[in-house]
Image (tube, rainbow, N blue to C red):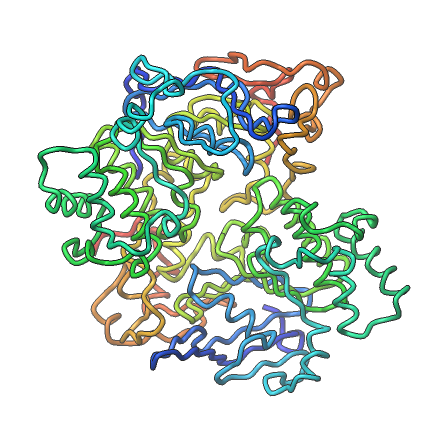
Amino acid sequence: MKNDSGSLLKVDDLRVYFRSYGQTVRAVDGVSLKVGRGETVGLVGESGCGKSTLGNAILRLVDIESGSLDFDGTDISSFAKRRLTEFREKAQMVFQDPFQSLNPRMTVGRAIEEVLYVHRKGDRMERRRKVAQLLEAVGLDASFADRYPHEFSGGQRQRIGIARALAVDPVLLIADEPVSALDVSVQVQILNLLKDLQKNFNLSFLFIAHDLAVVRYMCDRILVMYLGRIVEESPASELYDCACHPYTEALLSAIPDVDRSLSDKGKQARIVLSGDVPSPTMVTPGCPFHQRCHRVRPECKTNVPVFREISPGHFSACHFAEELMGKEDAGFRIPDAG
Amino acid sequence: MFDVPETAMKNPIIEVKNLGLHFGPASRPVRAVDGVSFSIDEGETVALVGESGCGKSVTALSLAKLVSGSSRYVSGSVMYDGKDVLQMEESELRWLRGNEISFVFQEPGMSLNPVFRVGSQIAEAIRLHRKGVDVHDEVLRLLQLVGIPAPEKRMRSYPHEMSGGMQQRVMIAMALACQPRLLVADEPTTALDVTIQAQILELLSELQKQLGMAILLITHNLGLVADVAHSVNVMYAGRIVERGPSRELLRNPEHPYTHGLLAAVPRLTGSVGRLKSIDGSVPHLAQLPSGCKFHPRCPKRKPDCEGVEPELRESGENRAVRCYYPVKQGQHEER
């Protein structure tokens, strides 16, 4: 991890609750994280784990219950509307579904220009020029500005979505599943584009995804989220060889991976979690993962594990993280039943 | 974990021959499927792989003549038990669908009727197709078979009361209600989370072993193919461009498209070098290029690729490839 002074975004003990019919959904339940300048941080987890809500909360798109959001040295958690607009010039979002995030009745040129208009950037001529620049920066032709979204393929639309996000020259991009709606052959085009843009514009990324292979390709550091909490944090290179939370282990082993399937060793390796993700309205005693955990022991049902550093830069919220760190059966092998 | 028997019984239960399916006006047809041939043996798992719009889903639906709308079959046949499905009467099709061939689709939430309890939806299939069974007991047995806990209680649930994984189990129970010989699974796990996806795959391969049915798996996920399928057909722009036993094909892809797809998938192991993407995007089926349909995106194209389209040719034991300049073994660059 980079040093503290270098971090651009600092989230501390953030909570986002939704209330309905007397129930409370703890969508984000005490999350702390940092994103350094020029760093790509990955956030992975299954649907419903709160990863998108966390991304939205950082941009203040949903109300936060408690916790602090520190961006570039300023606390933005209490900003009112006008200052939020200023903040959002610095931090922008790329959304998942390029079919739903573009207005079908607006030419893409106008859609991109709208961002500049909202943020009162330049006059009409300058905005037009900027739109052309942006289209070219994301690998499209400047003449596409006069076309409508339906004329473009999924990959091209996602490029337009990225151009919109880049319009105000942000320093932080939050990308929420930016490639999961795209075809395999197009996914890599977009991932490579994001990588290049990061280098050229010196961007910081919070990359939200459910696909651990994609995250591995993109990120320097990875956070694994389960039921509104971070359960493991690790440098990307370390997570895949030495997962220190049983949930991460299970996630890794569940992904169908060509190389692993082709090696005979890998074929025996799948950890199949029982059951579904429990409802975030319920407060489970003990470790939130214990009902589905393949390594569960008696104390997991009563004691809440502490999220702690187990090796430099590697954190885990499992009672037995230290054991997992030195485990013989690291990687994809199945643990002894017990 | 998934035991793929090395040799499935060589006894084709369904044979697709030179299938051609067009949509839209005859003057400007959308050629969704063009000259597709393949067969599925008893107890075998065959995968159809490709990106969206390559024709894999309509090919699968054609097995039970389920494609409707402004479509027409311009060529070919689907032979099941010596009869051509495409020529069958409505009454014969009713026997075929559900009884012999059944389907599991991508989004279980969209396929289940929201206003009926799941138990009665499964019961419907049993009532329609089977005589002399206790429907209630049979529904219970099926729910148990697909691993739904507390089936007695769950059969009285409505679809919205279940998670996506549970809904997909219900869909599978429904598909199995009439003991089909062939189960067509169209992206059965795409809408599900990875941990749930693993459960469903496990279930399908377990059921296949128990019931001995054949599976046609439609997917875009190559990792999944390696795990569960015996053989693979890779489709591009309405055609099969490569075919072979799954593990062999994934180890040594011969078609530049298959090769490109594999190179473009981020991996869990190995170096994190820059991945190579396939340039451009999938062509529109109404405006296909001349010659080889992949040539505008192909890194290995030569002038003659634009002329006459290559045939799907044998290239080894059980393998075939539709390319003039297939990638030969040992030519693969290091990934």
Relative image position of residue A25 (x, y in whole percent):
39, 75
Residue B119 is left or right of residue B305, and the answer is left
Q: Tell me: residue A239, above or below residue A322.
A: above
Residue at 39% from the left image edge and 18% from the top image edge: B87
Left or right of A258? Residue B297 is: right
Figure quadrant of residue A77: bottom right
Q: Name the residue: 31% across, 74% down.
A: A282
Q: Position of residue B211 (x, y in %)?
A: 21, 31
Q: Position of residue B2 (x, y in %)?
A: 31, 37
Residue A156 visible to an observer of this rendering = yes
Name which residue lies at 45% across and 74% down.
A28
For the image, the number of numbered tags is 0
Q: Nearer the viewer, residue B152 or B133?
A: B133
Res A267 → quadrant: top left
- Quarter of the image that includes the C terminus of chain A: bottom left
The residue sitting at 83% across, 56% down in the picture is A133
Q: Is residue A1 above or below residue B183?
A: below
